[in-house]
Image (spheres, rainbow, N blue to C red):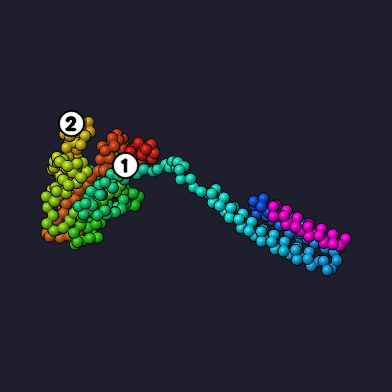
Amino acid sequence: MSNLMQSDILQQLEDLRQQAITALTSTSTTEETRAWHSEYLGRKGRLTGILRSVGAVSPEERPRIGKLANEIKTALEEALQERQTAIEQAELEAARNKELIDVTLPGRPQTLGKMHPSTRTLREIADIFATMGFLVYDSPEVETDEYNFQLLNMPPGHPARDLWDTFYTTTPDVVLRTHTSPGQIHAMRQYAPEPIRIILPGKCYRYEQVTARSESMFYQVEGLAVGKNITFSDLKGTFMNYASQMYGEGRKMRFRKHYFPFTEPSVEVDIDCVICGGKGCNICKYTGWLEILGAGMVNPRVLEYGGYDPAEYSGFAFGLGPDRMTMQKYDINDIRYFFSNDVRFLERIG
Ligand code: DAH
């Protein structure tokens, strides 16, 4: 009886080993291996269950059973460990595959912002003048009457002030700059007596009726060169170079005498119309010419205000209106689009 019991139990143990191994090979997740462990090796598991009946076997026979049971336990634990490692590996691999980026998927379209046409023109101008050694100089949009007018040779009551419809603020003598020219004084006072080659791009403000052709806020690009032996030829050469870079080689250029309080002599500069080539069209108002800037040799008094001795130093200055250039370039017929914040305006411009 006891022999039978022993072989019975040994058989049960062998069966258990077989079944456990088979069951283990069909586990494929960590949860399943955990369940497997408690079924076969757990405290209430089948191995323990078999060993419980060992009490019925005679003491001499127990060691053989114990030995086999231990052997099976170790073997199953090792097999579990192996299985567990394989499953973890597979789970990791699966997770990795799930997160894999499919590089062949078409991208989601991005709405790209565009540069405002005014900014584009300003950058183009700055790039061109940079080739001639002009730095960009920043100066304030809020100015004093002194900087906006007096130091530019327009004392209080000077009739030329009427050319600029000024926004006066509630603080006496503080104005929104009507032009970028006061920046000349800031720059000269900062650099004197060193030579200067700068452009000053920025917004200006005028108290004006807003129409398709004029806004109360607009851009100007001022330019200033000060040094020894600067002549009108330098002014001309600079503009020729600028015009050919901006509008193409071989532009015709003409200088008309003009008056500005801060330059002497003063000119307005035209190029042959970029649209009709000088034949006459509605852009050039059938004159064949487009005005591109106002300029002149810096008035000696302005040089002095800037801290340069006019007996030793000279210079030229200019002011150009980038908004008009932008309108011509992109065929925009209403300046109010620039600041009306309608994105369709930006989208239209390539
Ligand atoms: N400040 C002038 C204006 O707003 C433009 C200008 C003309 C600037 C001649 C200059 C210059 O520096 O030399 O109309």
Label 1, on which residue?
Answer: 117
The one nearer the camera, 94 or 2, is 2
Q: Find residue 196 and name its label.
A: none
Q: Amino acid at mark 1?
A: Pro
The numbered mark, 2 or 1, whose residue comes first in the sequence reads: 1
Quadrant in the rendering for residue 71: bottom right
The one nearer the camera, 206 or 159, is 206
Q: Position of residue 239 (x, y in %)?
A: 17, 46
Residue 150 visible within the image: no
Residue 74, above or below 104? below
Which residues, given as a range, are shown in magenta? 1-23
Q: For ligand 1, tell me if the residue under mark 2 lies within 8 Å.
A: no
Q: Position of residue 33 (x, y in %)?
A: 68, 55
Number of numbered discs on residues:
2
Report, in whole angstroms, how far the alpha carbon at label 2 lies from the one at label 1: 26 Å
Q: Is residue 14 magenta?
A: yes
The one nearer the camera, 220 or 259, is 220
Neighbourhood count class around disc 2 (C-alpha, 10 Å): few under 14, some 14–19, many 20 upward: some
Q: Which residue shows up at 82% across the image and 66% down it?
A: 61
Label 2, on which residue?
Answer: 280
Mark 2, secondary structure of its residue: loop
Horizontal arrangement in the rendering, residue 90 relative to residue 126 (left or right): right
Residue 291 visible within the image: yes
Q: Residue furthest bottom?
A: 60
